[in-house]
């Protein structure tokens, strides 16, 4: 039986708006900044294939589960889990799943905002024309100058966090709905332009081969590929769940999930096809880490027709893509403060945003003042700095763990009648979904975890 609950935060104005907002959350720095550099660091081919398999077999089913739980609970993930656990006669400790999501969102946004700041700085760098005709070395030193300056990084991080707080404080309908609708398609067009440029470098096929020809991969590489499937689809922390809670009843969750996953994957693969030919054409190293797009794309903009304009527009749109993701990272926490502490949305946004800003200082300094401070956790990672540690713990541990528990709750603990009613889809789709979340997702996540610590 359908529940009569209503979200106190409002609803999306249409089915399309939900799809746009969820796609806005999914498509972000993860696709354009992170995917290429982690694919580069982990050897390309096999990594990309594992990532694609994870999107299809784990990502889409978990996305359906998250939206389903959100729409049924109609509250912040913390309260949704509390309500659903009660309704389904389960242990109240399931609320911890909501809490882990809030913490993960806070930690992710703290570094996400710093990287979004790089993209903002690049809007102005590109517009000033400094990249015109620039060599790989020139572009490299512009990047180094930026990240070695704590003041610059701090200023951009601050601006980005303020932008995020402003939107979140305006709520569901008046936030970024409109921006997502028009800006995402523009980003796609500009990405295609860079891919077209990449085709002229003479190294396009080398890029394609790098991305799709299987090679070697480590256990850690497999974990990073799976973690990234969660990260890129915004899964495992309640972002999609909270967006699902604002979803009207008549939307097909299965269709929406497939659309969002396809759009997200297309953007990531296009980013890879844009970047790797440029890497090889300029004799650069694919595994050079987080600076990768900032050291490659400007070379393309510096050499193509109207590159200053295209490049500037590209970074503007990248900032928008990051912005529409950032709001979904703190929405679960803000919604909870509004529900439980009776706070106004504005105040809740300022509190959470302020705390995130403070946490972000760690990432700002990890690229300069604290660059030499690294640590290791046995079996997990070696010599990671502050930013790398946060990224590892959130994307590779917290999100997959969140996804695992979401799968367990949705498939093993929730009554079949409840999930069937909420998903309201064809019998065969329901059966495939249930099989995937019940068996495939939990087993895959556990195997990958064990493999990463070399236990199997
Ligand atoms: N999916 C976003 C990206 O790929 O950039 C990042 C993200 C947003 C991760 C929201 C997690 C999340 F809940």
Image (spheres, rainbow, N blue to C red):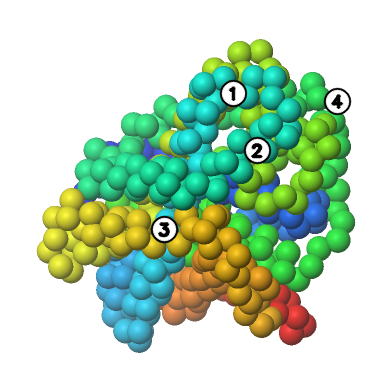
- For the point 57% across and 68% down, which residue is it? 373
Percent from the top left, x then y, of residue 413? 44, 79
Label 3: few (<14), some (14–19) or many (≥20) C-alpha neighbours in 10 Å: many
Of tags 4 and 1, which is closer to the observer?
Answer: 1
Q: Is mark 3 within 8 Å of ligand 1?
A: no
Of tags 3 and 2, which is closer to the observer?
Answer: 2
Query: Which sits earlier in the primary sequence, circle 3 or circle 2?
Result: 2
**What is the C-alpha distance between the residues marked 2 and 4?**
25 Å
Query: Which numbered tag is attached to residue 130?
Result: 1
Q: Residue at label 3?
A: 360
**What is the C-alpha distance between the residues marked 2 and 1?**
12 Å
Of tags 3 and 4, which is closer to the observer?
Answer: 3
* 154 is higher (above) or lower (below) than 271: below
Instruction: Give the side of residue 359 with respect to residue 378, left or right.
Output: left
Query: Which numbered tag is attached to residue 226?
Result: none
Query: Which numbered tag is attached to residue 202?
Result: 4
**What is the C-alpha distance between the residues marked 4 and 1?**
25 Å
Q: Residue at label 2?
A: 141
């Amino acid at each position: 039986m359908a529940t009569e609950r209503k979200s106190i935060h409002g609803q999306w104005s249409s089915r399309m708006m939900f799809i746009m907002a969820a796609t806005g959350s999914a498509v972000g720095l993860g696709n354009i900044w992170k995917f290429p550099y982690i694919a580069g660091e982990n050897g390309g081919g096999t990594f990309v294939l594992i990532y694609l398999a994870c999107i299809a077999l784990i990502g889409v089913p978990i996305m359906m589960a998250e939206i389903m739980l959100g729409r049924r609970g109609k509250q912040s993930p913390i309260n949704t889990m509390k309500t659903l656990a009660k309704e389904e006669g389960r242990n109240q400790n399931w609320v911890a799943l909501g809490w882990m999501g809030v913490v993960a969102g806070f930690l992710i946004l703290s570094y996400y905002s710093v990287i979004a700041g790089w993209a903002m700085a690049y809007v102005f760098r590109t517009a000033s024309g400094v990249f015109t005709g620039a060599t790989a070395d020139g572009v490299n030193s512009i990047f180094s100058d930026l990240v070695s300056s704590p003041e610059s990084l701090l200023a951009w991080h601050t601006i980005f966090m303020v932008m995020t707080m402003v939107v979140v404080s305006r709520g569901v309908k008046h936030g970024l709905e409109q921006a997502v609708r028009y800006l995402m398609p523009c980003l796609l067009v500009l990405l295609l332009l860079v891919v077209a440029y990449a085709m002229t470098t003479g190294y396009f096929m080398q890029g394609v081969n790098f991305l799709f020809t299987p090679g070697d991969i480590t256990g850690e590489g497999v974990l990073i590929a799976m973690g990234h499937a969660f990260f890129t689809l915004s899964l495992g922390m309640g972002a999609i769940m909270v967006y699902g809670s604002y979803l009207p009843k008549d939307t097909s969750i299965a269709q929406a999930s497939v659309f969002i996953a396809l759009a997200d994957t297309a953007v990531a693969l296009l980013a890879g096809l844009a970047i790797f030919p440029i890497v090889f054409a300029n004799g650069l190293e694919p595994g050079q880490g987080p600076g990768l797009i900032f050291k490659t794309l400007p070379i393309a903009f510096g050499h193509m027709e109207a590159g200053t304009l295209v490049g500037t527009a590209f970074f503007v749109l990248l900032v928008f893509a990051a912005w529409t993701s950032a709001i979904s990272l703190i929405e679960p926490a803000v919604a909870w403060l509004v529900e439980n502490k009776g706070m106004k949305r504005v105040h809740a946004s300022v509190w959470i945003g302020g705390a995130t800003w403070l946490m972000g200082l760690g990432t700002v300094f990890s690229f300069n003042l604290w660059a030499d401070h690294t640590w290791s956790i046995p079996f997990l990672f070696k010599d990671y700095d502050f930013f790398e540690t946060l990224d590892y713990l959130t994307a590779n541990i917290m999100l997959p763990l969140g996804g695992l528990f979401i799968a367990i709750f949705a498939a093993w603990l929730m009554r079949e009648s409840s999930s069937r009613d909420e998903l309201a889809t064809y019998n065969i789709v329901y059966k495939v979904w249930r099989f995937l979340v019940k068996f495939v997702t939990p087993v895959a996540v556990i195997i990958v975890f064990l493999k990463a610590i070399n236990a199997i």
